[in-house]
Image (spheres, coloured by chain):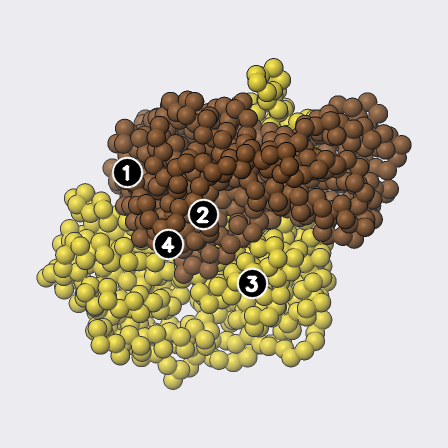
Chain colours: A brown, B yellow
Amino acid sequence: MKLNGTSLIGLRNGDKAGKPFYAINPDTTEKLDPPYYAATSAQVKQAADLSSSAFDIYSRKSGKEKGAFLRQIADNIEDLGDDLVDRATRETGLPEARIILESGRTTGQLRLFAELIEEGSWVEARIEHAMPDRQPVPKPDLRMMMRPLGPVAVFCSSNFPIAFSVAGGDTASALAGGNTVIVKGHHAHPGTAELIGRAITEAVRKSGMPEGTFSLLYGPGQEVGISLVRNSKIKAVGFTGSRSGGLSLWNAATSRPEPIPVYAEMSSINPVFILPGALPGEGARIAEGLMASVTLGVGQFCTNPGIVVLEKNKASENFMGHFAELMKQCLPGCMLTGDIHAAYKKGVAEKMGHQDVKTIAYQETDKKSGGYRSGIAVFHSDAKSFLKRPELSKEIFGPSTHLITYQTHRELLNIAKGLEGQLTATVHGTSSDFEANADLIAILEQKAGRLIINGFPTGVEVCHAMVHGGPYPATTDGRSTSVGTYSIYRFTRPVSYQGFPDSRLPDELKEANSLGIWRMVDGKPTRDQS
Amino acid sequence: MKLNGTSLIGLRNGDKAGKPFYAINPDTTEKLDPPYYAATSAQVKQAADLSSSAFDIYSRKSGKEKGAFLRQIADNIEDLGDDLVDRATRETGLPEARIILESGRTTGQLRLFAELIEEGSWVEARIEHAMPDRQPVPKPDLRMMMRPLGPVAVFCSSNFPIAFSVAGGDTASALAGGNTVIVKGHHAHPGTAELIGRAITEAVRKSGMPEGTFSLLYGPGQEVGISLVRNSKIKAVGFTGSRSGGLSLWNAATSRPEPIPVYAEMSSINPVFILPGALPGEGARIAEGLMASVTLGVGQFCTNPGIVVLEKNKASENFMGHFAELMKQCLPGCMLTGDIHAAYKKGVAEKMGHQDVKTIAYQETDKKSGGYRSGIAVFHSDAKSFLKRPELSKEIFGPSTHLITYQTHRELLNIAKGLEGQLTATVHGTSSDFEANADLIAILEQKAGRLIINGFPTGVEVCHAMVHGGPYPATTDGRSTSVGTYSIYRFTRPVSYQGFPDSRLPDELKEANSLGIWRMVDGKPTRDQS
């Protein structure tokens, strides 16, 4: 497919105006054609206006209609075939296998949401029948269900060019919930964004959805994104990226005349606690798993384990030595962008120069070998220093981790208590470890969106029970998840219908329950139809 | 019961320090004993610290334990008997019957939440079993449920001294969800707050809940409230009151190093649309219902109908005349506080002096008759003026409403489109009116938390299907409700447990389902036990 290099405003191409930017192949640092043009402020407004008019229609489509649309998007993405793999690998430096896996995850996710909304019970329908004779006052007929918020602005991430980008989790959950979507593409992979964007636009056309159900905007800096978030037609924001990027959107959204919800997933060091009982039997397995988790995708995962906490003793000393050796055997990998590469290099250099940090494994990170290649880095500090130095808990985005050894249970608990909000927290141990450290697990539950026992945080399963979220600053809204079917609730709100004649109610709330969905009727769950 | 005049910090009384303030009887403008003392900043910190330690224990109590605790609070409130009625009527000027009704609503609400958490399915448990042999990667065991956020700051409203105050909706939903609570009492009814606060404290003691599960703080200005919201131990805020009050808490909460959710219910003009078909047959009934709704509780309801929109024609002219006559027959009523009385008087005077407003019914509002007595006011404007003058949509808190007559369907829709977010929107009409105005109802659904057909917005049913909330500025978070069982989700977040041994899981997620709750297991709802 030939790439055009412009935004997609509803069903039309944006203009080629202003100074263009180019994708860079991080493996070679070469510019990739075509040039991409930022959306003008008039185009941002036009996309928002279209999105708002489309919302009036799209928000009333049935679950079956929206489901068919999501399935069409998935089919169209699959039809991109090698064009997508070729462009995405060149724009991101990620290997072919990863792009194929990530595409499969993305289409699988779209079809999972399709299934959810075709079935329909997700709307949480609740019905309370009238009691006209109740004393002292009659009870009215009241019915409630979840309804969409309005046009949603979705920001592509740098590290998941497909699964957390144009047709990623936020787009899928927003469209599934009945919202229209405007995506702001990531400047590092505009071609991948255009391919997926056109797949969605084609699905809009083919499924007969209104123009404006989807738009895609480009803009290399923050200007387009901020003006999108400030547009009064936009009713919610989804973002995955850096803390500074997330906070600037959050500030823009909360300082609007009408503040709107922002789901920004920003940063997490995903602590891993290895309790004493785990090492004798499982040390080698844990070291290998940890190595794989730290280096997966050149460490560019939101769930990358940034600190590993373990007791100071002979077994942990052996473990650390073994882990350091494993890490040294990894091959340096190509990072996604020059900025990420530079930030990683800076973060590693800062820790290496820190008086309270010992570097126990290190590979050089530079551009000599061609492209934005980064080596691993493993650090070690004792708990006392770590607890004193907040800068040591700062996220380093890349294939690096920091081992912390504690000497007392109090130190262990203090490390847990001092943590900021996290996407994940992991504990390795035996039954008796967990028994003896129930207090640790209780603290971690208050800190993270997902707790893992004897596993690793990378690998975020797309399913009904996943929470990929967590207290601030892991996200700006810990009451939500960006992965899995529960994320459909981030772009919805409950609406009550009082005294409505049956014919004016949405189908989900009509007395007959022709959709056969689960509903809470007068306090009892039922899917009875009449 | 003898009132002490101090904050309740966990199980202890606060100090009597600094300059005290007094409740004022709005019916006589007399000071009521005893003097009340504001919490010091040390006491705010102490309450927050206690609340945080108590949370570690209280958040792990079972649904049955928390349910018994809520029931004990309800019993203790009932035991207050005449003491509560006597004090509350003197502090608020509200009639005895209203206080008795409101107390019943409050205890009923506590028991409804008790029932909800004793049954237990509200936690939305989701279980996905492991698939260790899945290709290309194994699927881990993942389980999810809702968990509490932490200590919650709850602000008492002026207009519901019991149902939206110390043991009101936010306190009930927060405690039911497993959160601890610190209430900031309203300066207008400190004695009512103390009575209810002691009823809760006694329940904490009797039910064996940890000290700090509940505290009550006084402070006549904003200082205590703001320092509470800024305290890092506080994890969420519930508020019902003015827009300026809500926004100052919202600003404090969102500018913290760790921003927290704020559910501030602030202002709403609750538009009522009377479609042409309604008037011939139902005009008299609607006029009476509207009169009752506008004047209920001297108009001091969040759901008070502030504008009434109807077609300009002979029938509506008759309706307006009849409605104005009914309103003039109402007796002036005593308002809750001098501030509310003054604001109402000012708001009414402004509209009366507005060039585009005609006053069609008016009673004088002043203090001559003793106490903060307010008369009714009914205004009329045409749609053209209303659409041009945003100041005419400003909420006037009190027994006043504004009739707007339109001449074209486009004017009608423009009025709806121009509305800010609302708690409620009401439509009166016949089947053919609704058919012909489906576009109006669709717009209103995007504007309000609750839609009402052929009814009135006042009277907020406490049940499963109620949404008392709505888009900004009706509230700062339209994804929630402050009334009904769905409000339990405002103070909770989902947490995932991956790879947990059965014994370490919360009971709600253990394989056996010994609680017998509804769960989504591998995508299917079931309450099977094993």
**Disc 1 versus disc 2: nearer the observer:** 2
Q: What amino acid is found at the position of numbered circle 2 in the picture?
A: Pro
Q: Which residue in the protein does label 4 denote? A: A231
Residue occupying image coordinates x 63% and y 33%: A369
User: Which of pointers 4 and 1 lies earlier in the amino acid sequence?
Assistant: 1
User: Which of pointers 4 and 2 lies earlier in the amino acid sequence?
Assistant: 2
Q: What amino acid is found at the position of numbered circle 3 in the picture?
A: Ala
Please tell me if label 4 and label 1 are on a single chain.
yes
Q: What amino acid is found at the position of numbered circle 4 in the picture?
A: Asn
Q: Which residue in the protein does label 1 denote? A: A11
Query: What is the CA distance from the residue labelled 2 to the residue labelled 3?
Result: 33 Å
Q: Which mark is residue A220?
A: 2
Circle 4 sits in a helix, a strand or a loop, which is it?
loop
Residue occupying image coordinates x 57% and y 18%: B136
Query: What is the CA distance from the residue labelled 4 to the residue labelled 1?
Result: 20 Å
Residue A72 seen anywhere in this rendered image of the structure: yes
Of residue B470 and residue A8, the one placed in the foreground of this image is: A8
Query: What is the CA distance from the residue labelled 4 to the residue labelled 2?
Result: 19 Å
Q: Position of residue B393 (x, y in %)?
A: 31, 65
Q: Chain of mark 4?
A: A
> From the viewer's perspective, is B399 left or right of A105?
left
Q: Residues within 10 Å of mark 3 (few under 14, many from 20)?
A: some
Residue A424 occupies quadrant:
top right
Query: What is the CA distance from the residue labelled 4 to the residue labelled 3?
Result: 24 Å
Q: Which residue in the protein does label 3 denote? A: B252
